[in-house]
Image: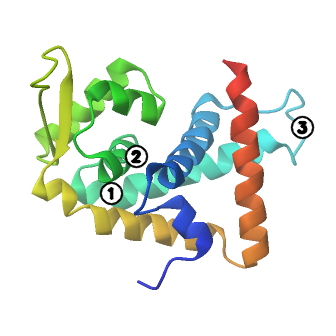
Amino acid sequence: MGSLSLFEYKLFSEFPYPESRLHTQLINIIVAYATNGIMTLDKCDRRSFGRYISHVGMKARVYLQKELEPYGIGSGQYHFLLVLFQMDGCSQEELTQKVLVDKATTTRALSKLESLGYIKRGRDPVDGRRYIVNLTQKGWELKPKIKEVLERWTSTILEGFTSHEKEQLLDLLERMEINSEGLK
């Protein structure tokens, strides 16, 4: 595995959470568009943003599902692991907020990860109403594997892009995400 490009670094950072948050949110946006089948009103428009976002999102979901299958992880659970790689020991509520899903989705995902031995949950000793989520050794061992899967995906979808184009695309997607915040 080679060194990360600036673009890949921003998509999977080993440093403070905002960079990896961007990756998670970009994938969430793409998957949400794909899952909801969001398209432009003119479905005949073959060059719509919705169509491209949807197709890339569907392909990302299929790719991640296939690549993570040997570990028992679905494309919906790996987001939680990415957050925990940055914020191990956070609360279940914090995970819900960071992954941008509802509490029920978080509970299902964490139950699966816990049954596979990747995480453990326990009551917060300070506030017994909260659950704290920690990666197990087995969970930490997934980090390089998930990183490699994401690097291969990124490398494949950005094949032929210049460094400038990659940076520009990241900036544009970030702006799209910021613009979408107002659509709550």
Q: Amino acid at mark 3?
A: Cys
**Could you say where residue 156 lies in the image, as x and y percent from the top left?**
59, 72
Which residue: 14% across, 45% down? 116
Binning the other alpha carbons within 10 Å of mark 3 as few (below 14), some (14 to 19) or many (20 upward) gives: few
Say the numbered circle drawn on residue 57: none
Q: Amino acid at mark 1?
A: Leu
Which residue in the structure is indicated by mark 3? 44
Which residue: 61% across, 39% down? 29
Disc 1, disc 2: CB below 8 Å?
yes
Q: Is 79 located above or below residue 41 in the figure? A: below
Q: Is 74 located above or below residue 3 in the figure? A: above
Cα distance in 3D space between marks 2 and 3: 30 Å
Q: Residue furthest front?
A: 126
Which residue: 29% across, 62% down? 143
Binning the other alpha carbons within 10 Å of mark 1 as few (below 14), some (14 to 19) or many (20 upward) gives: some
Q: Earlier in the sequence, mark 2 or mark 3?
A: 3
Which quadrant does the N terminus fall into? Answer: bottom left
Which residue in the structure is indicated by mark 1? 68
Mark 1 or 3, which is nearer the eye?
Answer: 1
**Could you say where residue 85 lies in the image, as x and y percent from the top left?**
31, 53
**Could you say where residue 129 lies in the image, as x and y percent from the top left?**
17, 14
For numbered disc 1, what is the local secondary structure?
helix
Q: Is residue 102 left or right of residue 125?
A: right
Q: Quadrant of residue 64?
A: bottom left
Q: Is 19 located above or below residue 74 in the figure? A: below
Res 68 visible: yes
Res 74 visible: no
Which residue in the structure is indicated by mark 2? 75
Binning the other alpha carbons within 10 Å of mark 2 as few (below 14), some (14 to 19) or many (20 upward) gives: some
Disc 1, disc 3: CB below 8 Å?
no
Q: Amino acid at mark 2?
A: Ser
